[in-house]
Image (tube, rainbow, N blue to C red):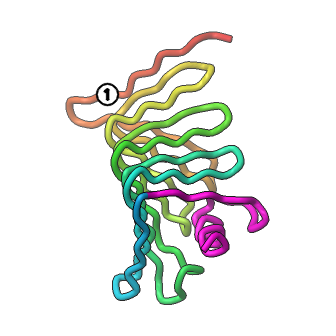
Amino acid sequence: MRILLATLLLCLGLAPALAQQVTVTSDHFEVAEAASEATFTGSVVVKRTGLTVWADKVVVAYASGGMEDIESMVATGNVRLKTDDQVATGQRAHFDPDSQVLRLTGNVVVENASGTVEGPELVVDLAANTSVFTGSQGSRVTGVFTPQ
């Protein structure tokens, strides 16, 4: 099972190499072959060197190629992503491995040593190395920065 999870997370871009240990814990794990989905539920924690992800639920959709052909990963409910130098929180995270785009929505807050940025949506394009916070009707992006 650990090899399957490491392969899964490699395809999702969460693990840079199969040799890197990835630990996933949850209260429940289910694979629905007919729906081509793998679902982790209940206090899900994904850990690898330099990254920890928490969520109430993580659903991985895969195509006809099986677990090596990941189409998307969606984490929902109290989503928190922590790297060595920042923490991002929101209510939903969607990752598309083909486009290398991560979309975090729902009261997004990103904190690091430079400050805090809040807004309704954050889109991170890993291929282009860009991050864009977007406001919505009635909600704006707010940043509070501390000069170094």
**Residue 3 location, x and y as percent?**
67, 73
Q: Nearer the viewer, residue 136 or 10?
A: 10
Q: Please give the residue where the numbered disc 1 appears in the rendered image.
A: 140
Whole-percent x, y for residue 103 in the image: 44, 51
Judged from the image, the secondary structure of the residue bearing numbered disc 1 is: loop
Viewed as shown, does residue 110 lie left or right of 21? left
Residue span colored magenta: 1-26
Q: Quadrant of the N terminus?
A: bottom right
Q: Residue furthest left?
A: 138
Q: What's the amino acid at mark 1?
A: Arg
Q: How far from the left and from the top, in percent, is residue 34?
A: 35, 88
Q: Is residue 119 left or right of residue 66?
A: left
Query: Is residue 34 covered in magenta?
Result: no
Point 34% across, 82% down: residue: 35
Residue at point 59% right, 80% down?
68
- Asked if 40 appears above or below 93 in the picture, the reply is below
Q: Quadrant of residue 17?
A: bottom right
The crowd level at tag 1 (other Cα within 10 Å; few <14, some 14-19, many 20+) is some
